[in-house]
Image (cartoon, rainbow, N blue to C red):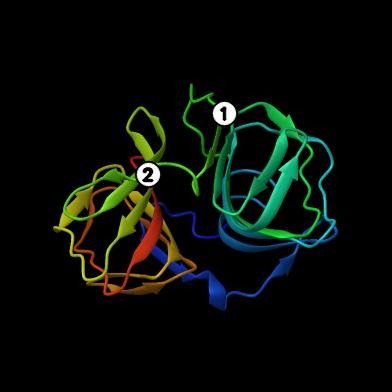
Amino acid sequence: MMINMNLDQSVSINTEECNWAITPQHGILRKKLERELDEKGRATSIVEYKPGASFKYHSHPNGEEILVLEGTFSDQLGHYKKGTYIRNPPGSMHAPFSKNGCTLFVKLNQFSPGDTSRVCIDTSNATWLAGQGNLQVMPLHEFDNQHVALVKWPAKEHFQPHTHMGGEEIYVIYGEFIDEHGHYPAGTWLRNPHMSKHHPFVEEETIILVKVGHL
C-alpha cells in the first residue's frame, strides 16, 4: 500500500494528530508518513518502542536514518538517548531494542548510491554554528548534494524567500515553524518537492531537522 509516494507533491502531516498502528513486531507501533510497500521499500515513520520491545537481528539493504525523539534506543553497538542522530548505511545489521521505551523518527531505504558512512551524533553535546541571519545550524551529514542538519530559529526570525533545489524535508522538533502555506507545530513532518518555494518564519524559538537535496 503506497502512502505519499508522489515526490512531486508537497506533504504536511501533524504526527501528534495521527493514530498509532500496530506492526508485525510485538511492542512496536508506528505512524506511517510515506511508504512504498507494506514492509519494505522507501519509508518514513514515527516509531514507538514499548518498554522491553526488541527486533531480531536484521539488515538494512539501503540504509536506515534515525533521530531519537524520546527515551533511549539501543542495539549491540550502544545506547542512544533523546537527541541522538544515527545513520546505519546500506548492508549494516543490528538487533535494536529499548529497555524503558523510546520514540523515533525513522527513514528507511533512502540512501544515495555510495553513501556508506555510519553516523552517530549526540546532538545535545554537539556544537551549534552560525547560520544565515540569526539562525544556528548543527550539521549532521553531507553527501553529494544532500545535507542534513538541525536548525535553531530564534523568536521572530524571518528567512528570505527561497527555492528548494533537490527538495526539502523538515521535522519540527520544538516550537512552531511557519510559512505562507501554514503553521506547523512540534511533531509536524513536511516534504516539499524539487523547485518548490516558500518564505518561512517563526514567532517563538523553534528547532527543526532539515534534509535538502535528496528529492
* Quadrant for the C terminus in the image: top left
Q: Vertically, is 133 above or below 62?
A: below
The residue positioned 57% from the left and 28% from the top of the image is: 118
Q: Residue furthest bottom?
A: 17
Along the line of sight, the residue nearer the viewer: 159 or 91: 159
Q: Type of residue at label 1? A: Arg
Along the line of sight, the residue nearer the viewer: 204 or 183: 204
Along the line of sight, the residue nearer the viewer: 124 or 209: 124
Is residue 122 shown left or right of residue 133? right
Point out which mark residue 138 bears: 2
Instruction: Give the image quarter of residue 184.
Output: bottom left
Q: Vertically, is 70 above or below 124?
A: below
Task: Tell me where residue 191 appears, x and y as whole percent.
Answer: 39, 57
* Quadrant for the N terminus in the image: bottom right
Q: For mark 1, what is the residue?
A: 118
Q: How packed is label 2: few (under 14 Cα within 10 Å), some, or many (20 or more)?
A: some
- Sequence order check, earlier mark of 2 and 1: 1
Task: Tell me where residue 83 appears, x and y as whole percent.
Answer: 54, 52
Q: Vertically, is 183 above or below 206?
A: below
Task: Tell me where residue 50 appears, x and y as whole percent.
Answer: 79, 62
SS under mark 1:
loop
Is residue 57 shown left or right of residue 29? right
Q: How packed is label 1: few (under 14 Cα within 10 Å), some, or many (20 or more)?
A: some
Task: Measure the C-alpha gap from mark 2 to mark 1.
Answer: 17 Å
